[in-house]
Image (cartoon, rainbow, N blue to C red):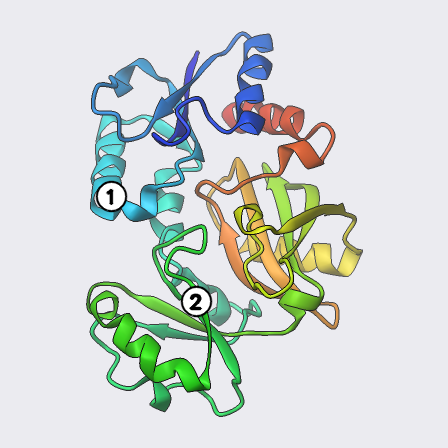
Amino acid sequence: MKIGILTCARLPELLESDQKLISLFTKENISAKAVIWDDESVDWRQFDYLIFRNTWDYYQKENAFNSWLHKIELLGIKTFNPISVIQKNKHKFYLKDLEKEGITILPTIFLGKNSISNLHDLIPKSWDKMVIKPAFSAGSYLTKLIDRTEIESIQNEFKEHFSTKDFLLQEFRPEIKELGETSFIFFDGKFSHAVNKKPVENDFRVQIQYGGKYTLIEPNIELLEQAKLVLSKIPEKLLYARVDGIVIENKLHLMEIELIEPDLYFDLADGARERFVESFLKVLRS
């Protein structure tokens, strides 16, 4: 069996924490190698399976990524997670569907491209601050925290983007600074570990490249069941999933469910990589 572990040109050998998966696959008599998703020299037919891991530039190459997904689908190569899942998850308007299914999300306004005439008319008066971000994005790309006094300037600054991209406008909750964001990681539908991520002072972004601090935590049963409920709304079989949210009075408010290329925080949880590989084998057998 030969597996391609998908990455990007910026990380040709994978993130260090993901590189260690290769030796674990080798122990299972599986040949695994890092492969850049948009490397035109790659013969994809050499791989039995592809695993999305560090494709961290896909949102900057939207058309190319969509074309590549179509090509892999036509070749009939099975991917983890499935391409059907990737297609839905790469556009954050899936949150609208989850909300309709009873999942609590952060208060969100979904802004279709070319639909914005005056943001002032759309924003509830109760919102003091809000986060704006593209629906097709990752890693805080084009993401900004603004208050009501900045609405007009952001509308002018993002004018070109608003004509070509869909956006989300979410109410900013102070809990993100006070308590941080919580990520629940699942392999083959089973809970593996959870991580709390807090931004540094005077920032709202929790990503480590912006100084965010990550801590392994043990969530209580109620929160874990809420994360599982989110996961249950995805009908397809998943190798991995990361449910991200803010906890407000022991209620999980979903920010995203990451099913494409999330950091799974392997280095923070003992045995996480081993559980990932075991889950891959179980998913194959099923």
Viewer can see residue 140: yes
Specify the label residue 66 is tagged with: 1
Q: Look at 25% across and 47% down and name the residue there.
A: 62
Q: Look at 29% across and 66% down and name the residue there.
A: 166
Residue 160 position in % (x across, y down): 20, 68
Residue 263 position in % (x across, y down): 54, 40
Asked where in the image residue 82 lies, by quadrant, the reply is top left
Residue 235 position in % (x across, y down): 48, 49
Which amino acid is tagged 2?
A: Lys
Separation of marks 2 and 1 at Cα, in angstroms: 26 Å
Asked where in the image residue 176 lies, by quadrant, the reply is bottom right
- Could you tell me which secondary element the residue under label 1 belongs to? helix
Residue 265 position in % (x across, y down): 62, 38
Asked where in the image residue 223 lies, by quadrant, the reply is bottom right
Asked if residue 169 lies left or right of residue 217, the reply is: left
Which amino acid is tagged 1?
A: Asn
Asked if residue 166 lies left or right of residue 247, the reply is: left
Give the mark, 2 or 1, whose residue is nearer the N terminus: 1
Is residue 180 positioned above or below 71 on the image? Answer: below
Q: Which residue is mark 2?
A: 144
Is residue 272 positioned above or below 257 on the image? Answer: above
Q: Look at 49% across and 69% down and name the residue there.
A: 99
Q: Nearer the viewer, mark 2 or mark 1?
A: 2
- Could you tell me which secondary element the residue under label 2 belongs to? strand
Is residue 14 positioned above or below 131 on the image? Answer: above
